[in-house]
Image: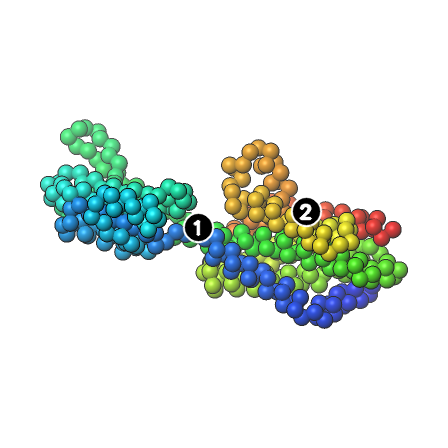
Amino acid sequence: MRSRIWPIMRKEFLEIRRDPRNLGFVLAMPVLMLLLYGYGISSDVKWVPLAVYDRDGRPPARELVRRFTSTEYFVVTAQVGSLREFRRVIDTGQAKVGLVIPEDFSQNLAAGRPAPIQFVVDGSDSNTANIAIGNIASIGKSIELSPRDLRPHILVTPTLENPVPIELRTWVWYNPELKSSYFLVPGLTAVILMMLAAMLTSLTVAREWERGTMEGLIASPLRPHELMIGKILPYVVIGLVDVVFILLVAVFLFRVPMRGSLTLLMISSTIFLLGGLGIGLFISAATKSVQVAFQLSTLATMLPALLLSGFFYPIENMPPILQAITALVPARYFLVVIRGIFLKGAGLAVLWKELLFLSGFAVFMLIASSARFKKRLE
């Protein structure tokens, strides 16, 4: 069988080499998509424009402003002197967050009384607003202004005369700085690989039909599964090269830590690619048009991988019927695998269920596409 498959593989590699622009596109597209989406849809919100309405004007008030703007989360874009001007800069979008410091702030602080301040957040951009509110709370917990510690704490009071303070401490595992790139980049890898794998095989076989060269392959003594294997293997190699490029960009450009086994990552990616290539072959058996094959492969891979894998939206928050559908989306399982390997250093003992599903899906799609291919050739 190997002697019959090798000529098909060699022919496919020669076809790829004859079109260096197409090869360059195939190798560069995943990296370009990773860069575009990795930077473009980052949920990290930094340098939020801040308007300050300081009615106190004393050193403690100025120190408070400095504490909030010494981080990368806020930058003062307006210092206002009236409530009307304060409202105007929020309305015009010059500032997304406004800080109002009452005129008795320093006086209350010196007297040991509560010294409230007010933040006004522009809620027209709910994503920025929610993240800004979280950053305000996070910074507020770390602020200490003498003579009184202003950090919020919870009081458990055995007696009214002897309150006992309890300090809460939170640890975040695997992503201590809560960088969105740690979450997005591995997820994008799953989406890009699935789309690329299905697109490559579907377009390649559809192009054979359009050129009329498929009839020559049909007339050869090749069996359908041998022809299918010969078509797939070159793109497995190309897909793994893309995985290496994506890995390098993720680690060295986005600084995503690689804590797990590189071998397990490559094996998992190979299994995932085989499933995607099987989808592409199945699509190619349903159409002879390159344009239709491209549209079908995009519809069958990119949309489910983006919307039904847990990449953008938590599966737990989806309606029950959609949760059931996500069980059939291979990107859902590969997301768990790639994030587990990258961020948690997880091994086969943890990820075996997801890898078992991906293996079963790959085998099923290859058998189904082979059967469909055989029927089409006959």
* Residue 307 visible in the displayed image: yes
Q: Residues within 10 Å of mark 2 (few under 14, many from 20)?
A: many
Give the residue pinned by disc 1.
43
Viewer-proximal residue, 18 or 147?
18
From the image, which quarter does the N terminus lie in? bottom right
Q: Which quarter of the picture shows residue 133?
A: top left
Three-letter amino acid code at disc 1? Ser
Q: Which mark is residue 299?
A: none
Q: Residues within 10 Å of mark 1 (few under 14, many from 20)?
A: some
> How many marks do you count on the picture?
2
Is residue 71 shown left or right of residue 61?
right
Residue drawn at (49%, 62%) of the image: 251
Is 255 above or below relative to 152? below
Element carrying mark 1: loop
Residue drawn at (29%, 54%) of the image: 77
Q: CA distance from mark 1 to mark 2?
A: 32 Å
Q: What residue occupies the far top of the structure in this picture? A: 159
Question: Residue 125: where, in percent of width, then height?
Answer: 40, 44
Residue drawn at (14%, 38%) of the image: 113
* Residue 138 visible in the displayed image: no
Of the numbered discs 1 and 2, the one sitting upstream in the chain is 1
Three-letter amino acid code at disc 2? Phe
Is 226 above or below relative to 64? below
Q: Which quarter of the picture shows residue 269?
A: bottom right
Residue drawn at (74%, 70%) of the image: 14
Question: Residue 249: where, in percent of width, then height?
Answer: 51, 63
Give the residue pinned by disc 2.
361
